Image: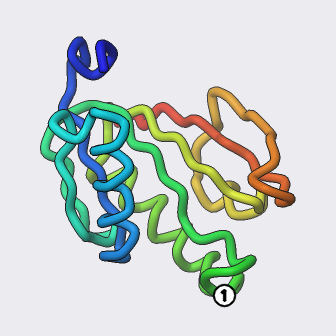
Amino acid sequence: SSLCQTALSPIFVSDIDPESVKTAQKNAEIAGVKKFLTFSTEDILNFKPKTSSGILILNPPYGERIGVKEDLVTFFEALNLKLKTDFKGFKVGIITSSKEHLFSIKMKPTKLNTYLNGDLPCTFAIFDVRA
């Protein structure tokens, strides 16, 4: 919790699924960090940042279990526009099992990390959103 105490920016936690938000709140309570977090149930495409800069971490549906892969192309194109419109000045991390979807984010990642999420190979891409 010392990391949270020295954080320069507020930390907002959101998911489109109310049950996921409840689970996140329970986990934050167990970890002793809930008091440092603000929770909401909201779609990222409707979310308005409350600060002019910060860090945004996204774990959108992969199309493996949740969502349809074809719908994800449309989602990532809309996300690209959302990031460039509302998240200028942010550092954005996106976790996905499809590098192809990352091409819809019309920015060059500053870092790419590959790892396994269970048995699923995933990429964590970091972007600096500029004006």
The colour mode here is rainbow
Q: Residue at x 24, y 62 (%)?
A: 47
Instruction: State the image quarter where residue 42 is shown.
Output: bottom left
Q: Amino acid at mark 1?
A: Val
Q: Quadrant of the C terminus?
A: top left
Where residue 34 appears, as percent x and y from the top left, is: 23, 41
Residue highlighted by disc 1: 68
Q: Is residue 56 left or right of residue 106?
A: left
Instruction: Sort mark 1 into few (<14), some (14-19) or many (20+) by Cα contacts within 10 Å.
Output: few
Q: Secondary structure at mark 1?
A: loop
Where residue 26 appears, as percent x and y from the top left, is: 32, 55
Q: Name the foreground residue: 21 vs 51.
A: 21
Q: Is residue 48 left or right of residue 18?
A: left
How many marks do you count on the picture? 1
Instruction: State the image quarter where residue 110 is shown.
Output: top right
Where residue 64 appears, as percent x and y from the top left, is: 74, 77
Q: Quadrant of the N terminus?
A: top left
Q: Residue at x 67, y 42 (%)?
A: 124
Q: Name the foreground residue: 16 vs 94.
A: 16
Report the residue that reaches farthest toward the front. 30
Instruction: State the image quarter where residue 76 is shown.
Output: bottom right
Q: Name the foreground residue: 53 vs 117.
A: 117
Question: On screen, 53 above or below 1?
Answer: below
